[in-house]
Image (cartoon, helix red, strand yellow):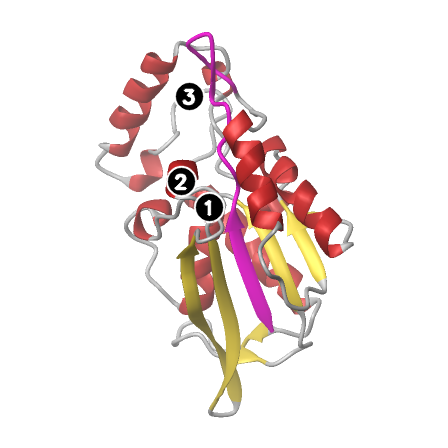
Amino acid sequence: MKLTLIRHAEPAWTHRGRMVGNPALTELGTIQAHQLADRSWSRVDELWVSELRRARETAAPLAERLGLTPQVQPWMNEIGDPVEWDGMPIQQVKARVSKLEGAPSLDRLWRGVRRGEPYHRFRERIAAGLLRTLEGYGVKMLEPDQPRLWQAGQQKSIVLVGHGGTNAVIYETLLGCGAIPIAWHKFRSLHTAVSMLRTYPMAHAVMFALERFGDVTHLSAEQVTQ
């Protein structure tokens, strides 16, 4: 199995100095999405996408290029921001994020705010959704407490258009990395960066190997954003 993970293009997080909760792409982000689609693509069997707007808009030109209908996977959504941040002055949001990330425990990230998603629940959601979905293709973790070995399943080539945090937890889960520190600081990628994981035989099973990470060669230097 080959999984190609893509982070969404540049979103318009602010409008008139205020936070946008589920943003569309910027003008540059739209260009990035089309540049991504214009890459050279080998066989792709399925295209999975987060239900959030920035991911769906990034995937749209690629879906047209590949002739595929995106499969929306809600478990791929980025961590749920507190609803009160939508429309809040952006400097105030940044100050709150800085305070939350400096908390003594990661379990406190997003805690204490209305309808925010605690970090540990975010990780659990992504990992559980990934494992459940892969099992549908016959790919099942054999030894959860050991270095990640998997039952080999269907030889599918799947492209996932998601988010920095979502993709980072997927890397942690498939590669057997520890959960600390925060996943998206461990695997930092640029907008529309392309990474690839592939299964390889190992003992009586298969393992996932990271073959490529953070490729943005489809962008010019002026088009690269983070």
For residue 79, above or below residue 135: above
The circle on residue 224 is 2
Label 1 secondary element: loop
The amino acid on which the numbered mark 2 sits, given as a three-letter code, is Val
Q: Residue at x 66, y 48 (%)?
A: 62
Residue 6 is covered by the magenta coloring: yes
Answer whether labels 2 and 1 touch (C-beta < 8 Å): yes
Q: Position of residue 166 (x, y in %)?
A: 49, 47
The circle on residue 113 is 3
Answer whether labels 2 and 3 touch (C-beta < 8 Å): no
Which residue is tagged 1? 219
The amino acid on which the numbered mark 3 sits, given as a three-letter code, is Val
The count of marks equals 3
For residue 175, above or below residue 150: above
* Residue depth check, mark 2 versus mark 3: number of the one nearer the observer: 2
For residue 73, above or below residue 225: below
- Characterize the local packing of mark 1: few (<14), some (14-19) or many (20 or more) Cα atoms within 10 angstroms: many
From where the camera sits, is residue 51 visible? no
The amino acid on which the numbered mark 1 sits, given as a three-letter code, is Leu
**Nearest to the observer: residue 190 or residue 92:** 190
Q: Residue at x 51, y 30 (%)?
A: 28
Q: Which residues are magenta?
A: 1-20
The CA distance from mark 2 to mark 3 is 33 Å
Q: Is residue 200 left or right of residue 101?
A: right
Residue 86 is covered by the magenta coloring: no
Q: Position of residue 70 (x, y in %)?
A: 73, 48
